[in-house]
Image: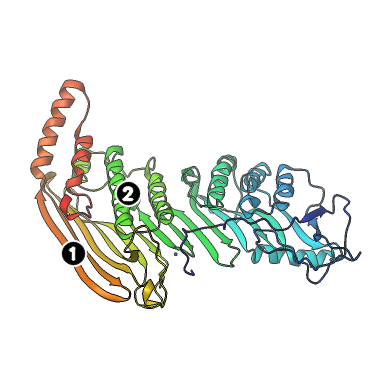
Amino acid sequence: MMNPVTSALRFTPVYTPPAPLQIASVRQAASAVADAPATQVTLGQDTRVANAETYSSKGTLGTPVVRLVWENEGAQDKLSTQMFTSAASTNIGARFQGLGASLIEQLAANGGQRVSQSALAVGVNGSTEPGILDLQRANLREHASNSVTLSLTTASGATVNIGLYSGEQGLAVEASVSNGELNDDELKALAAMADGFQKAVDGLNQEKPSLQLGDLLKVDQSLFSGLQMSAKLELASGEQQTFDLRLNGSTRSLSLQGPSGQVQLELDSKGGALLGGKAQREAAIGNYLTQFDAARQRGKGDEQLATLFKDAFSQLNSVDDDSARPARHSSAMNTLSRSLLSGVADFTASISETVKASNPMRREEVDRFDYSVSQSTSKDGKGNSFSLQQEQQSSLKASWHSSLNPLVGLQLSRDNASQNYRYHQVNDETSSSTRASVVNGALTEASSTQQASRSERVRVYQEGVLKSDNTTSASERKSRDQLALITTLLDNDAKSRRQSGISTFEQQMADKSSAWLLQSDPSRI
């Protein structure tokens, strides 16, 4: 839900082409040379250079030749054709290109009947005995160094499983339906998800990965009750990059983890009871994204990791744009009582960069960036007498080194001459609370409290000697009675309805929401 590096979170490394790899298929005649013990076949990104002293059986220097042994030899379908092109690629970013969509489309076209295809890379003198090949295929799927899987649960309980796998052994795909069958509507909806799944796969496989989940998240929840997508991608260094996405009714979660850090996010709309209108939700999401940007800038966080964090938050909240609302959700009393809420699902989220000890002379001075933010909502009472309270809070803990001369980069070593720098430590806490009370159907209380505190300690070293140690801090807390504001906006809304038939209440509340939404800068409270 990670070895230190300075780059952003990466699911694929910068590609350095290896020596050309000649690939032949058993479907096509190919000249063959005997395997040599030093020969290595890699289907994936590989920065290793072929051993120049490796000779063929004819005693000549040359690139190794392997052949692809196909699980379903001679298949001429779109999926197999796409796989033949993909298997020949030396770029892992392109290895799964088009395969996810083709696999889902073929499963849907086959009425949900199992689809399986693989291309095993074997030396020209390697065994093609069926039993051995079956074991190799199973091993490839189970221990693939690069894999993407998708699991869907239908409302009737059937499970759709989609898998893409690649590694040094080859390339494989598999799709099946278990615990039931898919009806026509489910097959049609599954086929409609093909492009969305492929976009998500392609985004993760970019050199700078991106989250392109929008179309995938539009899954028809009346047909599919659950979704899980996972990815495991390996860098040339052997480090793993992982991704996990889960949707289950009103709850959803996402995690990203790699050498540069991790992102985690969990949301719960509580059956839609917390959700507001479009203007209210847009204002809240925009405010949260602004707070995320402010935290990254203040704590000198990694921009790429922060972008993934923001995209995850925005895209997972988009699930609620058209989701069902509970009965009486749009009644005047319910809308009024939720007017001080954010309008978005409750959540917990965090972004943590890998801790680095960049100063060998002072290992305790670590570079770090840890940011967490959450929202929780509670309700007491029932019927026409109840109260709603929403708490939002965030925490930023960050530290980093900076050069005394902005034109000269840091090159910290055990030599005192290199020890010219500032060491920053930031510790910020922010919270916001709103409360609304209804008694016998009448709004009797509407209040908000915003609070923010921030602190930064800066130590300055010159040639290893501490020259200054200063801490600056600021804090602010403000409570407001919002009942009068709501009454005024309701009067304005009634006037607008009489004159033009247009309601202005939601938009006006959204415009005023900066007075109760999360604010990390004390000077803006």
The crowd level at tag 2 (other Cα within 10 Å; few <14, some 14-19, many 20+) is: some
Q: Quadrant of residue 60?
A: bottom right
Image x and y of residue 148, in percent = 58, 56
Furthest-right residue in this view = 58
Q: In which quarter of the image is residue 41?
A: bottom right
Q: Answer above or below: position of 57 versus 96.
A: below
Identify the residue at image location x=57%, y=60%: 233
Q: Which amino acid does label 1 sit on?
A: Thr
Identify the residue at image location x=22%, y=49%: 517
Image x and y of residue 395, in percent = 27, 62
Q: Which amino acid does label 2 sit on?
A: Leu
The answer to whether residue 186 is seen in the rendering is no
Q: Mark 2 points at which residue?
A: 289
* Front residue (pair 236, 242): 236
Image x and y of residue 353, in percent = 40, 64
Image x and y of residue 514, in percent = 20, 45
Q: Answer above or below: position of 310 versus 414.
A: above
Q: In the shown orientation, is residue 454 left or right of residue 485? A: right
**Image quarter (top left, top right, bottom left or bottom right) of the N terminus:** bottom left
Cα distance, mark 2 to mark 1?
Answer: 26 Å
Q: In the shown orientation, is residue 91 left or right of residue 519? A: right
Q: Answer above or below: position of 508 versus 118.
A: above
Sequence order check: which comes first, mark 2 or mark 1?
2
Query: What is the number of the mark on residue 472?
Result: 1
Q: Helix, strand, or loop for circle 2?
A: helix
Q: In the shown orientation, is residue 504 left or right of residue 159? A: left
Query: What is the number of the mark on residue 188?
Result: none
The color scheme shown is: rainbow
Q: Do the residues labelled 2 and 1 touch (CB within 8 Å)?
A: no
* Front residue (pair 53, 525): 53
The answer to whether residue 397 is seen in the rendering is yes
